[in-house]
Image (cartoon, rainbow, N blue to C red):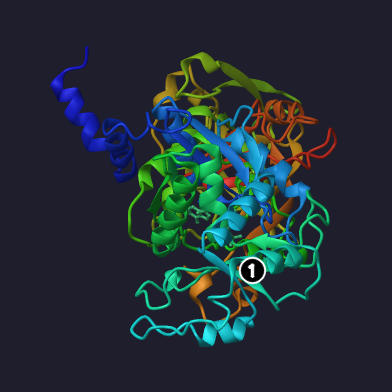
Amino acid sequence: MTTTAENTEEKRSLNFIEEAIEADIEAGKVKNSPTQVVHTRFPPEPNGYLHIGHAKAICMDFGAARKYGGKCNLRFDDTNPSKEDTEYVDAIKEDIHWLGFDWEDRMYYASDYFQQLWDLAEEMIRRGLAYVDELSSEEIAAQKGTPTTPGQESPYRNRPAEESLDLFRRMNKGEFPEGTKTLRAKIDMANPNMHFRDPIMYRIIDHPHHKTGTKWHAYPMYDFAHGQSDFFEGITHSICTLEFEVHRPLYNYFAKVLADIKGTTYVPRQIEFNRLNLTYTMMSKRKLLACVKEGLVRGWDDPRMPTLCGLRRRGYTADSIHSFIDTIGYTKYDGMISIKLLEHAVREDLNKHALRVMGVVDPVKLTITNYPEGQVEWVEMENNPEDAESGTHKMPFSKELYIEREDFQEVAEKKFFRLTIDKEVRLKSAYIIKCTGVVKDENGTITEILCTYDPETKSGMPGADRKVKGTLHWVSRKEAVPVEVRLYDNLFTVEDPSNDERDFRELLNPQSEVVLPCAYLEPWAAEQARKRVGASSTSTANRYYQFQRIGYFCVDYDTTEDHIVFNRTVLLRDSK
Ligand code: ATP
Ligand code: MG
């Protein structure tokens, strides 16, 4: 039994959409619907890959259905015949599954309803609620009026229903060129809501449709198709983004017309929430497509893209995306969300799951002059201190190592607590070393750092607890495996590339991908990474790593037995 306190707690955490749904359940509206359960739909247009904004919609649509024991349909909005592609359909399905949702046997296309929509349009003509107009789109626009001045009625508005019916059918036979005729709803040319001023329901498009071929020449507009498809599927809550708020009265009008024709009281309800906008990226599918087509990125799944497949390739987990979306919530106000919130979410999740390993991304050789030639010691490392079950692995230590070039300064700046001449640091999980000198090439670049070690300072030895300021990561030179590392950063240099006067191509961050062809990784980690060869993009086994002191990395799909590639997902902490 739940206590009152828990109940209040739960009430407080409901968002406004859940509140609306609960009110509709309470009022019996859900019981009055065709499936009698909360029934939502996710309606992507298959003209691009899904991005993190779509994930927000998916979590709401599928999430609400899950929460209230209802159903969520997947409906491809393919009402515009000229733009769709089956590559997108497959990718969209994969991404929804990756987020942990399923539409069961309810995958539909808006084009499945073309006949039903057509029949409904004919019935509206017969009832005097629609007419075929012969004005051009320019003339229609010119007669629309303004929000404060009424529009003018089309001269074709009051033509007999039989004439409209005949013309409507001939529109669909391909008898008239595009743009010469439309079907318009006969509502009110003086309505203060411009969407009521005889909106267009059908237009002629002479382009074969990827599913229906050349059967249709007249295609329904979004406003007519979407709400009616909701009706046909028995949707109770049609949740969408804020730009559709102004269309809602028309949505309700068409729903009522259909309910009257069908003689029911059930109607779907549209509810709008704020679209997700993230800093340093953009969500426009058109512009993302341009990035792909122009080769500005590696493809739709480039680790810098805000697409779900791109985020996945970058090393984002589905759980981290869910937790990010929970954090930002759903509101009625558009705004910009900091990408740092998304980065924080992935850091928190990877902290729980990533294997701790040592990798040196920008190596410089370090020789321990007093360490025995040819000796190898195996030091033990925890796989993940956050996960007691994860165990340990062993890593070789020897006379010649690599450390990170930036961890050494010949002349140390103030507050530089890493390695410098005559100073000591600890090599993580191994000994304390002291720098005695450097070797340089003819250009003055350091090629080798010379050190001595204190044999008493290893774990288990008397000097194990001796304190020094810095601790460095390292790998043993002979056993380390060379790997390619790709460092990723924001794709754009400005916070809001979509609202900049400059073209987005001028705003690309030239440092968004930095490829380091020869980083070094401890051998155990390389062995784990090789297990990924041939794995699917959505499998998570052996995928996530923390390179100690550097950041979270994941094995890229380009990895082969002989060539391991890692992507940097995110730095260990927010550095900017
Ligand atoms: P288009 O311009 O191609 O219509 P779209 O972003 O609206 O682009 P759809 O495929 O039509 O793409 O979107 C499917 C669903 O995802 C819609 O319900 C839409 O409201 C929602 N959606 C799209 N972008 C975002 C976003 N940035 N934040 C939240 N929801 C979004
Ligand atoms: Mg859309």
* Residue nearest the viewer, comparing 514 with 349: 349
Q: Is residue 76 above or below residue 124?
A: above
**Residue at the image position 53 percent from the left and 49 percent from the top:** 228
Q: Is residue 338 left or right of residue 550?
A: left
* Residue nearest the viewer, comparing 326 with 314: 326
Q: Amino acid at mark 1?
A: Ser
Q: Residue furthest right?
A: 562
Q: Is residue 348 above or below residue 161?
A: above
Identify the residue position indicated by label 1 in the image. Answer: 164
Quadrant showing the C terminus: bottom left
Q: Residue furthest top?
A: 1
Q: Position of residue 372 (x, y in %)?
A: 69, 27
Q: Determine the image quadrant of residue 222.
A: bottom right
Q: Determine the image quadrant of residue 491.
A: bottom right
Within 8 Å of ligand 2, the CB of disc 1?
A: no
**Residue at the image position 55 percent from the left and 15 percent from the top:** 391
Q: Determine the image quadrant of residue 18.
A: top left
* Residue nearest the viewer, comparing 252 with 447: 252
Q: Is residue 371 left or right of residue 386?
A: right
Quadrant showing the N terminus: top left
